[in-house]
Image: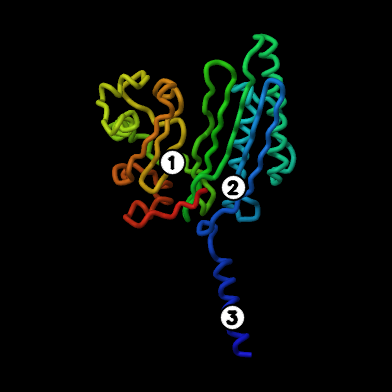
Amino acid sequence: MKKYSLFFATLSALILIACHQTSANRDLDTEKLHYADSSSFAHLTTVVELPAPGQGKAADQIRKKLLDVLDGQLSHIVQYDRRSFPAYDGDTGNAEKMVAYCHEKAFEAFAKDAEEAHEDYGEMPGYEYEYTVQKTRETDNYVVFNATGYAYLGGAHGGVFGDGPMTFNKSDGSLIAHFLVPSCLNDIQPLIRNGLREYFSEDGQKISNRELNEWLMLESDIIPFPAMSLEPSDEGLVFTYGQYEIAPYVAGMPSFTIPYADIERFLTPEAKAILGGVLHGQAPEQDKGE
């Protein structure tokens, strides 16, 4: 009897510990939804990965934000300044129905627009639109979902669009809106320039600032923050600029990493809250992304 009592006492203790674990210390379970439709002149693919329901308020808040982002993107698939279809008015707790609705309505608008373009301009390549929301990185403190897409609407080439990396604090589900205080832009210009010089370098040979200026398409000497949010890594913050944002299309999407040691003093309090370990010389947190 004592052995059984000890067993159940130990089991009860383990269950109690598990129940008191915060969601920040557990990997987020996710669900993946995939939809694809084609017409004679258009193809739309929507792939969405979301925190599975039933994991607490923080996970639910992340889930809701990602669904809002998806709705905002697909509902403006034809016109950037207005919705192409009404907002989903069903149970928002049912992600499958909401995503299926957004995909279906977006495809109707997209296919109609492609057909009208074909009627107006004659033979032309079909429209392509691929939108993906995917978990790309997870640590004990934060999780990153990347919301990006590719669109081809005729012409010489397509383009990449979307919100890019979205980093959430796992303890409360809040989105990290800013990793750096906005006022530091002038101070970190040398760091941004060094990163861009590395990006544009060939065979390990860094280009000069004068050569970098020849690549850039800017109205002033100040290089702006990227439109996409910065992304945390083990080594530092990753800066990624969109196509045409600061350089011509042939330059791709300039990307580089600024080490935390060089940029720590400019971090916002919300960024420091999730990056504490790597900022104080501890071993990098294990990347749990797929």
Q: Is residue 2 visible?
A: yes
Residue name at image x 34 percent, y 21 percent: 215
Which residue is the site of mark 2? 61
Marked residue nearer the N-terminal end (1 or 3): 3
Which residue is the site of mark 1? 231
Identity, as a three-letter code, of the amino acid under mark 3 = Ala
Identity, as a three-letter code, of the amino acid under mark 2 = Gln
Label 1 – label 3 distance at C-alpha: 44 Å
Which x, y percent locates residue 285? 42, 55
Q: Does 70 sit left or right of 260 as displayed?
A: right
Residue name at image x 54 percent, y 64 percent: 21
Badge 3: residue crowd in 10 Å (few <14, some 14–19, many ≥20): few
| Of 43 and 48, the residue lying toward us | 43
Quadrant of the drawing holding the N terminus: bottom right
Q: Judge depth for marks 3 and 2 and give the one in front.
A: 3
Q: Does 159 sit left or right of 52 as displayed?
A: left
Label 3 – label 2 distance at C-alpha: 35 Å
Which x, y percent locates residue 277? 38, 55
Q: Which quadrant of the view contains residue 13? A: bottom right
Q: Does 70 sit left or right of 24 as displayed?
A: right
| Of 126 and 49, the residue lying toward us | 126
